[in-house]
Amino acid sequence: MEERIARACATAGRRREEVTLIVVTKTYPASDVRILSELGVRHVAENRDQDAAPKAAACADLPLKWHFVGQLQTNKVRSVVGYADVVQSIDRARLVTALSKEAVRAGREVGCLIQVALDADASGRGERGGVAPGGIEELADLVAGSPGLRLDGLMTVAPLTGEYAGREQAAFERLMDLSTDLRRAHPAATMVSAGMSADLEQAVAAGATHVRVGTAVLGVRPRLG
């Protein structure tokens, strides 16, 4: 994986240190997270609180940053705030309010990425969650003004439908344009999380700062039983 990211950076004319690898450890046990840490991984991601919370607790002694990347229900916010350094799936005002309340209660600062739905329908939401591009500014301002929260940037998942279906690089380039717009009002919100195992090269070419990779690092986990 390190070679693959390095190649993608070289092809894009970027330095390797410009791209951070986040290993998605969902379905894998805490013992695997320990191995990753020993190999130098510093960023891990989970998408389900019921799996992530005990895993993060079991690995609390490790020098890791935990990212929450799944759609987050407000009834899980208190638990997630207990371990997540960054929530990458901010997509509605109610979630921001709940995160702010719990971050203040816990005495923590939680980084937030606005999840952008590039396949947003008429309701303004995408198939995999997220907010339409037109909703970024309002949500970003809310995060930036909320105690206990830090606006870090934007995240997207390559759409399976709509104008960007099958056009991953175009989707990620659109996200970079939206990031440029966001940084005019919020200069510190420089993080752009895009690209997974199948399309990380396109994300790096577009300018992503973080890629979220699971299968390409850990393999396909065999079904138990």
Image: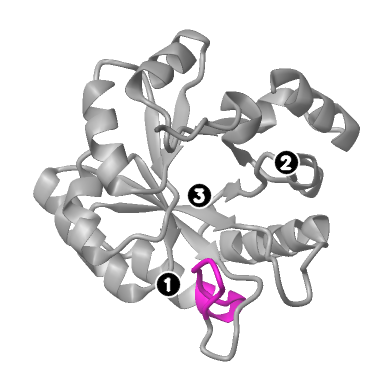
Disc 2 and disc 3: Cα gap in Å? 24 Å
Work out which quarter of the rendered image holds the N terminus and state it. Answer: top right
Q: Nearer the viewer, residue 102 or 39?
A: 39
Q: Is residue 99 above or below residue 203?
A: below
Residue pointed to by mark 1: 139
Question: Which is closer to the viewer, label 2 or label 3?
Answer: 2
Disc 3 and disc 1: Cα gap in Å? 16 Å
Residue pointed to by mark 2: 200
* Residue 205 rendering spot, x and y as whole percentages: 81, 44
Res 89 → quadrant: bottom left
Query: Type of residue at label 2?
Result: Leu
Label 2 with label 3: CB-CB less than 8 Å: no
Check disc 1 and report its element: helix, strand or loop. helix
Check disc 3 and report its element: helix, strand or loop. loop
Label 2 with label 1: CB-CB less than 8 Å: no
Which badge, 3 or 1, comes first in the chain's sequence?
A: 1
Q: Is residue 30 above or below residue 67?
A: above
